[in-house]
Image: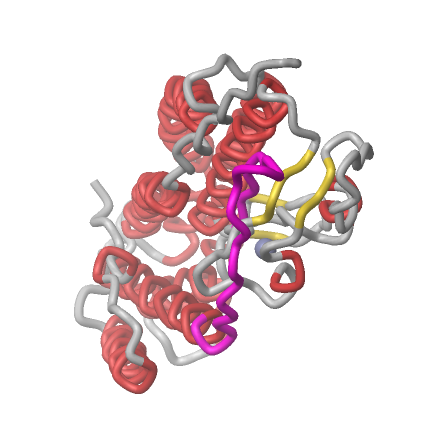
Amino acid sequence: MAPVTSPPPPGVGPNADALANTARVAAEQVVAQQVGQVATFLAGGGLASESVDDLSWQVNRLAEIARLRRQLALSSREATKAATAQVPGMLADVAQRAAGGLDVQVQTLTEDLVGALIRMWSGLPTLLTGKAEIIVISAASQVRVGNLTRVQATAQAADRMVAQGIAPARDRAGRQWTAPAYTEMIVRTSVMDAGRTGRETQAVRFGTPYVQVSDALRECPMCRPWEGKILTLDGTDPEGIAQGTLAEARAAGLGHPNCRHLWAGYFPAYSSRVQPTPDSAGWEASKRQRELERRVRAAKLRQQTAETIDPGGLTAQAAKTRVRDAQRQLREHVKATGQRRKPDRERVPQAS
Ligand SMILES: [Zn+2]
């Protein structure tokens, strides 16, 4: 008879939220920097100077647009370098810890994440340069037809650009994302996948075909039915306890982008069963909170942009009011739902 050895406890699950948030903050910094560069560019060329006429300002800014583009590209290259340097170690570490110290293959996950970040950051300068060009052209024509000064018209046009959202990333479904939201989503998803791969590696190494799905806090409705389910990794089911294959569950949405569920090797004689605790109110409340935080950050970025182009002007004043309104809504939501406020999610870095 083979000796009975007790299986290892599941390796340490990834702290995906913290890693994703750190990556989001870094992305926020890059966006604030690049949008700040665009605002500074728009404010240049004698925007506020009466000795420069509208046409001269427009011609000058369009002539200088290639220089703006190079500046933005430099910032994107820095962001890309940082991602390329950090991602491989981060995912390898997460996977190895989740596997209880075993070596885990995460090369494909790493390449996918690095590739997505590179595509996003290299697309941002082109996007922003195109928008800057449109702002210059539309601001100058606004002055001709309206009763705004050149400074006011430029601040307004730039404000519209930021308000529409700057979305250099596109996911597989074709949906467009802002850089911070996309970074947070793909980092969380990749980190979770690295952790899942680690746990799967551990299960296989210790000879069980089964995994059990975790009970996630504030779980999304799509994955709620999977909590506590036992799935088979390879389709075999010697104990007759599998409630499906992992591949089927994943095809049905388990482990979707931003998903918080994990699974660990299930050893019939040793492992305890997960007791799902449904928390749909928690999911709704935190979803709404994220939405309101995004609104605060967007309002702040609009305010910063307006202040750079037309300090204390109408657009800047309106933006300031908008920031206060968004903050008030957030305060009320947090109070009503008992959620914890996350000040770092309401911050927008200063453009440097
Ligand atoms: Zn999920």
Quadrant the C terminus occupies: top left
Judging depth in this view, the residue of 345 and 150 nearest the camera is 345
Location of residue 193 (image quadrant): top right
Question: Could you tell me residue 334's position as x and y percent?
Answer: 29, 78
Magenta segment, which residues? 261-282
Q: Quadrant of the N terminus?
A: top right
Q: Quadrant of residue 321?
A: bottom left
Q: Would you say 106 lies left or right of 78 here?
A: right
Q: Is residue 18 above or below residue 106?
A: below
In the image, residue 1 above or below residue 117: above
Residue at image x 31%, y 41%? 22
Point 34% across, 82% down: residue: 337
Query: Is residue 267 magenta-colored?
Result: yes
Viewer-proximal residue among 54 and 346: 346
Residue 49: x %, y % from top left: 22, 56
Please provide percent x and percent y for residue 146. 45, 78
Q: Is residue 265 magenta?
A: yes
Question: Which residue is situated farthest in the front direction here?
Answer: 1
Give me the residue at 75% from left, 45% from top. Answer: 242
- Taking the image in four quarters, ligand 1 sits in the one at bottom right
Work out whether 193 lies above or below 173: above
Question: Is residue 148 shown above or below 137?
Answer: below
Which color scheme does this rendered protein use?
secondary structure
The chief SS type of the magenta part is loop
Q: Is residue 36 left or right of residue 275?
A: left
The reply to whether residue 253 is visible in this rendering is: yes
Instruction: Give percent across and percent down for residue 311.
Output: 19, 64
* Residue 221 appears left or right of 284: right
